Image: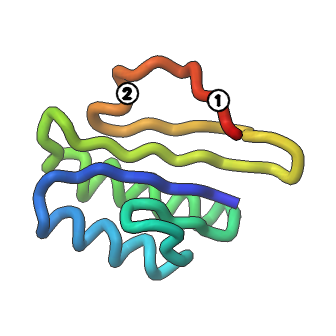
Amino acid sequence: MLVVTYDIKDDKLRTQFSRLLKKYGYRLQYSVFTIKNSDRIMRIIIDEIRHKFEKNFSNSDSIIIFRFSMSSIDKMLKFGFAKNMDDDIVFL
């Protein structure tokens, strides 16, 4: 499973990003989506972020993608402002 969380200031860009995510998963909260994990879908989403969205980010915009396995978090990807944040995250 992928969990994608985002904070994008620009309304138009944020709406475009949520529409992208709706193609592959469903909304858990306003800025949090869950997506069935597949390498193909992950590549599509990452390519879209890198080529369409990231170049339009402001200094405070961020996207974080958590890739979960059945027992733990496998990978965490950060884009935009989130790249600068610490990696120490605790899940409850």
**Is 2 on the left or on the right of 8, as rendered?**
right
At horizontal 23% and vertical 64% (from top left) the residue drawn is: 14
Q: Check disc 2 and report its element: helix, strand or loop.
A: helix
At horizontal 87% and vertical 53% (from top left) the residue drawn is: 70
> Mark number for residue 36?
none
The picture places residue 80, in percent across and down from the top left corner, at 29, 37
The picture places residue 10, in percent across and down from the top left corner, at 11, 58
**Is 82 on the left or on the right of 27, as rendered?**
left
The picture places residue 60, in percent across and down from the top left corner, at 19, 36
Quarter of the image where one finds residue 84: top left
In the displayed structure, 90 sits above or below 92; it is above
- Quadrant (top left, top right, bottom left, bottom right) of the N terminus: bottom right
Badge 2 or badge 1: first in the primary sequence: 2
Give the amino acid type for the residue marked by disc 2 in the picture.
Lys
- Quadrant (top left, top right, bottom left, bottom right) of the C terminus: top right
* Residue closest to the far front: 92
In the displayed structure, 36 sits above or below 59; it is below
Mark 2 is surrounded, within 10 Å at the Cα level, by few (under 14), some (14 to 19) or many (20 or more) other residues, namely few
Q: Which residue is mark 2?
A: 83
